[in-house]
Image: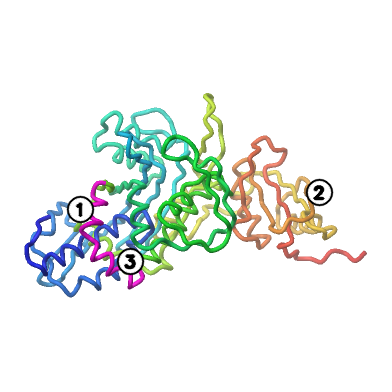
Amino acid sequence: MRRSTSGNSNSIIQRLFTAGLIVVFLTVAAMAGLFVFDQVRQLIAASDVLPGLQEPDAANEVEWNPQKDPLPVWKGTERVNILVMGIDQREHEQGPWRTDTMLVLTIDPVSMTGGMLSIPRDLWVPIPGYEEGRINTAHYLGDLYDYPGGGSALAAKTVQYNLGVHIHHYARVNFTAFEEVVDRIGGIDIYVEEEINDPYYPDESYGYDPLYISAGWQHFDGETALKYARTRHSEGGDFGRARRQQEVMMAVFEQVTRLDILPQLASQSPELWQMLEGSVVTDLTLDKIIALARLASKVKPDDIRYAVIDEHYTQFWETPDGQQVLIPLRDGIRELRDSIFTTDAPLLEQEGEPAARLAAEAASIEVLNGTMTEGLAGLTAEYLQQQGIQITNISNADRTDYVDSLVIVYTGKTYTAEYLVGLLNLPPTAVVHGSDPNSEYDISVILGSDYQSTEEPPEQ
């Protein structure tokens, strides 16, 4: 990009830099491109854009006529999917690095819908051209063996191969940039559902930097925000980690989109851009970033879907050499994928009749009473049997003080578990993954005090 010597042009360049860096960075830090650019555009739309900013677009996806419009316009009609990666790039290391964070952003310019899918780093998948391994090793192998396009390209190909969706572009950001940008926007506010106590959070010298965060509203600086997003020793393990990353993304978005923050970023844009230039690797050109962000700003929040490939769509497994990994349950992942990347698919769209799918899983189910209400498990089991669900065992739970009801899946039969949640009017979060694949039953339903029975227990 050419720099102009005029003050007005320099101001425009600074603001365009800001727009670009915000969109690229917040591609990692949120679906921010889907929201924030509408605010950024207001800051720069009144100015003239420098000739020569646009780079050639062989695919004719971007159109730009500065005389008619101050910003590039996205003209493509194909859905665009972008793989976003975060790497733990330490200053004293040369790499190659594994990806610590992986997610795919998508926008459909025809239906004006968007989505974000988080991918766990321990997902055990085929890596094209190599053996099976954790999905986060694809980037490492690509850099190590000089794959065309490097680690980012091999990671994109691996995600594309295993998800079955085309990855058009990629963006890779290191965590140092994340910390600095969060600090520069004044930190972020997050509501922490449960306290986090991680005595084994790694430091920069391969030791430990114990992490404790109490429950409730917290204001995080960049360092603490990164720790909150990365810790694995908390509720939900790697899956909870992916959900926390999405929380951080949205918190950054909310902070940046405040009108008093954007002008500050604009004034700091040369320094910010210099900081991010060595920390962001992407095959997106600036004109495409701006055009996509401008397009995305028109997507309504209700038309954006978020999901995590979590315990509902994976099975814990230990490899012969002792690695703890996640085996993808591909039927479930396919449904989840379609709900994010297919325009007309409802969330978790199910194919076929429920009775056929329930019969195909043929899950053995036990119903356990986790409350002081006598006969609750029996009444619930009777109700489920009336709905065509076969119950194998009825008993009391290990204790009587369960607050939240649980539907514990031990053998990957998630369709039946989700169907049970619907019948019992429980929240989707009631479905959890059990750690015992050799359990006597496929699914355990534990009734807590939040469960409202469809029938009253008999009077004593």
For label 3, the SS is: loop
The quarter of the picture where residue 413 lies is top right
Q: Mark 2 Cα within 10 Å, few/some/many (few <14, many 20+)?
A: some
Q: Residue placed farthest to the bottom in the image?
A: 46
For the stretch drawn in magenta, what is the main secondary structure?
Answer: helix
Asked if the residue at tag 1 contacts the one at tag 2, i.e. Cβ–Cβ closer than 8 Å, the answer is no
Amino acid type assigned to the residue bearing label 2 in the image: Ser
Residue type highlighted by circle 3: Val
Residue 58, horizontal then vertical, whole percent: 14, 51
Range drawn in magenta: 257-278
**Sequence-first disc among 3 and 2:** 3
Q: Is residue 178 magenta?
A: no
C-alpha span from label 2 to label 1: 61 Å
Q: How much space separates mark 1 and mark 3, taking CA atoms?
A: 19 Å
Residue wearing tag 1: 285
Which quadrant of the rendered structure holds the N terminus?
bottom left
Q: CA distance from mark 3 to mark 2?
A: 52 Å
Could you tell me which residue is drawn at 51 percent across and 56 percent down?
Answer: 348
Residue with the mark numbered 2:
395
Q: Is residue 302 above or below residue 155?
A: below
Name the element at disc 1: loop
Vertical side of 190 occupied by 143: above or below: above
Residue type, numbered disc 1: Thr
- Relative placement, left or right, of 86 versus 45 is right
Q: Can residue 271 be found in the magenta stretch? A: yes
Q: Residues within 10 Å of mark 3 (few under 14, many from 20)?
A: many
For disc 1, the neighbor class at 10 Å (few under 14, some 14 to 19, many from 20) is some
**Residue 359 vs residue 79, the one in the foreground:** 79
Percent of width and height locating residue 225? 44, 54
| Disc ID at residue 59 | none
Q: Quadrant of residue 92?
A: top left
